Image (cartoon, rainbow, N blue to C red):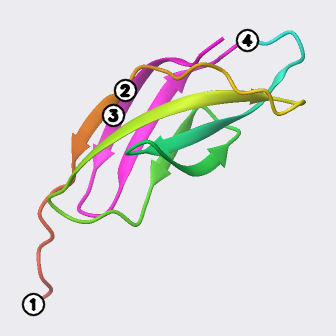
Amino acid sequence: TAPTNLTIGIVFSDSVGLAWDASTDNVGVTGYRIYVNGVYNKTETDLLTVVTGLSSQTEYSFYVTAIDAQLNESLISNTVIATTSFQIPPP
């Protein structure tokens, strides 16, 4: 099944936290693929992640898919949108 209840966590100037509910699969879920603006970013095994390397004051969309041991990929989760914060310059 697709991951559900994808939500935004803490938002910084260069990163966004994400969390979601687990998927189920007859073979067994082995990981979750994270997509940023529709482009694959990374794979996680937990139900949360922090996406890093983002630009400040920029809007990003995120969704997650589940993969199983045979690398079958689920449908996408809900899509969430976050805007990174302003980066405060060092003194």
Quadrant of the rendered image containing residue 17:
top left
Residue 78 coordinates in the image, percent (x, y)? 41, 20
SS label for mark 2? loop
Q: Residues within 10 Å of mark 4 (few under 14, many from 20)?
A: some
The amino acid sitting under disc 3 is: Ile
Is 6 covered by the magenta stretch?
A: yes
Q: Which residue is mark 4?
A: 24
Q: Mark 3: which secondary structure? A: strand
* Crowding near the residue tagged with mark 1, few <14, some 14–19, many ≥20 C-alpha atoms within 10 Å: few
- Real-space CA distance between mark 2 and mark 3, rounded to the nearest whole angstrom: 10 Å
Residue that badge 3 annotates: 8
User: Counting other residues with Cα less than 10 Å from the Cα at mark 2, is it few (<14), some (14-19), or many (20 or more)?
Assistant: some
Could you tell me which residue is drawn at 16 percent across and 56 percent down? 85
From this view, report whether residue 61 is shown above or below residue 24.
below
Taking depth in this image into account, of 8 and 68 the one nearest to the observer is 68
- Nearer the observer: mark 1 or 4; the answer is 4
Pick whichever of labels 2 and 3 is earlier in the sequence.
3
Q: For the C terminus, give its image quadrant.
A: bottom left
Marks 1 and 4, the one that precedes in the sequence = 4
